[in-house]
Amino acid sequence: MTKLVILEYPDPRLRKKAAAVTVVDDALRQFIDDLLATMYAANGVGLAATQVDVHKRVIVLDVSDTRDRPLVLINPEILSKEGEAPVEEGCLSLPGIYDKLSRATRIRVRALGPDGQSFEMDADGLLGVCIQHEMDHLEGKLFVDYLSELKRTLIRRRLEKERKQKSTSSDSRAHAPAL
Ligand code: ZN
């Protein structure tokens, strides 16, 4: 398995819209293994292909405490949404940045699994939020897009400053999980 490089905001490649997967084959499954390995190595609970500069509709997640329940969604579609509640989110492409935004509390999703078979599932709580967050990545959308222009500017400046200082933001685990 290969650990892939995660793009960081404001990299313009994070704005590309991902294309639907047409064939689920061994090459795609290899990529999915790499994507999962990259997510686990970064202590993330979710990662979208877009974040590693692969513009295909693939997301991986693991919201378990034991970090052994990988979930792979290929060509995910939200069939229905219910409720709305504010949640704090982070993102592996915005290290150390956390903010509150509103998400549906319950969703029904259809996707293909790594075996190429279509399935449907209901998701709420952290999993539901993660799926919505990762699906936004496939559209080239980031959670900071839900915030004000002023907040985005401050976040961009903070990340640039931190990159210059090459700080290894060690406090990120104290917040909500990064997606
Ligand atoms: Zn993210």
Image (cartoon, rainbow, N blue to C red):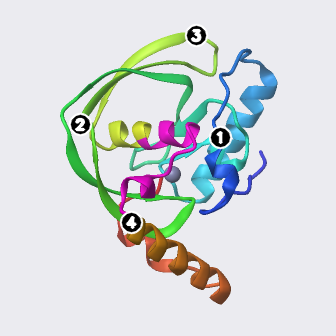
Q: Position of residue 48 (x, y in %)?
A: 58, 42
Q: Nearer the viewer, mark 1 or mark 3?
A: 1
Disc 1 packing (10 Å; few <14; some 14–19; many ≥20): many
> Which of 131/164 is in front?
164
Amino acid found under the numbered disc labelled 4 = Tyr
Q: Are marks 1 and 3 in contact (CB under 8 Å)?
A: no
Q: Is residue 141 above or below residue 80?
A: below
- Magenta segment range? 133-148
The residue tagged 3 is: 117
The residue tagged 4 is: 98
Point 57% across, 20% down: residue: 113
Q: Main secondary structure of the magenta part?
A: helix
Residue 74 counted in the magenta span: no
Mark number displayed over residue 9: none
Amino acid found under the numbered disc labelled 2 = Thr
Mark number displayed over residue 105: 2
> Which of 108/143 is in front?
143
Distance in Å between CA atoms under marks 2 and 3: 26 Å
Q: Nearer the viewer, mark 3 or mark 4?
A: 4
> Which of 1/8 is in front?
8
Distance in Å between CA atoms under marks 1 and 3: 19 Å
The residue tagged 1 is: 49
Say which label, 1 or 2, has the lower sequence index.
1
Amino acid found under the numbered disc labelled 3 = Gln
Say which label, 1 or 3, has the lower sequence index.
1
Give the SS element for disc 2.
Answer: loop
Point 62% across, 57% down: residue: 41
Amino acid found under the numbered disc labelled 1 = Ala
Distance in Å between CA atoms under marks 1 and 4: 21 Å
Distance in Å between CA atoms under marks 4 and 2: 19 Å
Residue 9 appears in which quarter of the rendering? bottom right
Q: Position of residue 51 (x, y in %)?
A: 64, 49
